[in-house]
Amino acid sequence: MERPGPSDVTGSDTSGPDPQLAVTMGFTGFGKKARTFDLEAMFEQTRRTAVERSRKTLEAREKEEEMNREKELRRQTEDIEPTPSGSNVARDCSKPSSRGTSSSESEESSDSSDDELIGPPLPLKMVEEPVNHLEEDILGPLPAPLGEEAEDDDDDDGDSEEEENPVQKIPDSHEITLKHGTKTVSALGLDPSGARLVTGGYDYDVKFWDFAGMDASFKAFRSLQPCECHQIKSLQYSNTGDMILVVSGSSQAKVIDRDGFEVMECIKGDQYIVDMANTKGHTAMLHTGSWHPKIKGEFVTCSNDATVRTWEVENPKKQKSVFKPRTMQGKKVVPTTCTYSRDGNLIAAACQNGSIQIWDRNLTVSQGHLSPLFLEENHLIKTNMC
């Protein structure tokens, strides 16, 4: 039995696709050569088609614009060019205006004008009033007289003066801009001598600025976060300028020295005690605080726990006194801000219900009740605050 030679094998391969193999594979196109595409030619044809379409679009647009211009020019020329009968009408209408002594002349002029007139007669104003070519050449409204121009200028100057920024009226000679941070600056304090400034904001930072040692960069010489992750709400220097009262969103106020080191921190009260007079400190978020105007080391704070408390720097473990704002019906009300009177004998608090309540500083609240003075709307009570 003879084996097929190499020539027989190659001959079978070059003869074309085997029909039996196509039937076995399941489709008739098996073994055919794949169709090739010239991508560059296709891209070139697409580009030419796009260029041709763009050119046709531009030509159509230019033709349309040219037709619009021609129409506009025709309209303008029709509006500007007078009709030939218009001059005759004006000329003939001027004849009856010059009245003669004899009625026959007027009748003849009227007959001739009637013969030549086409259309309705022109108004008398166009016939009698002389044409002023200067006024026709002027476009827009006529200029006002000199007196009216002066009055208008005065009015404009008055309006501009009223619209000026009120900040520009401050009698300052120099101005600088201090960059605290990217968030809201919520607290500001200036020491009594005016040499230093302290700022606080929603970024929890407290920054110290020294005007005497400041260079052209206007940077703070110290930055710290005394209350960690609580927003700063109030900063105030003491009367001597050696301490700063820091009130934040926490329930504990802090006192730091003028270089930023902590001096004392108020104790936090027990939030499970119902009577706020029996707690040693605030149990809710603070709002603001203020130093005593005459006694060194004493300050007052108010909080969301509906109390106003006085403190001493030497005794941070317990408040000195507690004041509880109440409505006229005896209900709790939250104080939003508090301060001392000018002589330091009274403590005033502004509350959320719109009242201003005042207490004697020397009295303390424990189990008893202290009746405050109420300053309601349209009801003023004279005190010795001022």
Image (tube, grey):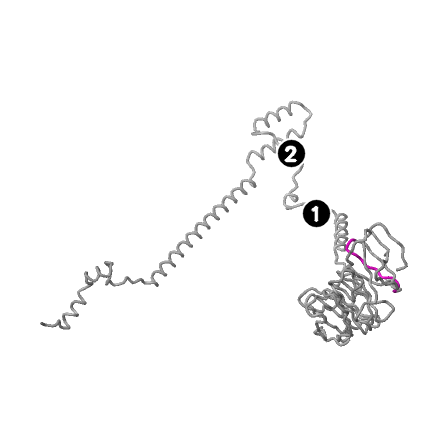
Pointer 2 residue: 127
Report the magenta residues as a range.
344-353
| Identity of the residue furthest to the top in this view | 104
Q: Main secondary structure of the magenta part?
A: strand
**Is residue 345 in the magenta section?**
yes
Q: Is residue 254 visible?
A: yes
Which quarter of the figure has residue 277?
Answer: bottom right
* Amino acid at dot 2: Val
Q: Is residue 167 visible?
A: no
The percent coordinates of residue 137 (x first, y second) are 63, 45
The percent coordinates of residue 351 (x first, y second) are 79, 56
The percent coordinates of residue 15 (x first, y second) are 17, 65
Q: Give the quadrant of the C terminus.
A: bottom right
Pointer 1 residue: 143
| Identity of the residue furthest to the left in this view | 1
Q: Of marks 1 and 2, which one's residue comes earlier in the chain?
A: 2
Q: Is residue 379 left or right of residue 266?
A: right
Nearer to me, 80 or 320 = 320
Callout 1: SS: loop
Nearer to me, 178 or 376 = 376
**Is residue 263 in the magenta section?**
no
* Amino acid at dot 1: Pro
The numbered disc on residue 232 is: none
Crowding near the residue tagged with mark 2, few <14, some 14–19, many ≥20 C-alpha atoms within 10 Å: some
The percent coordinates of residue 365 (x first, y second) are 84, 62
Nearer to me, 323 or 234 = 323
Does 61 appear above or below 121? Answer: below
Callout 2: SS: helix
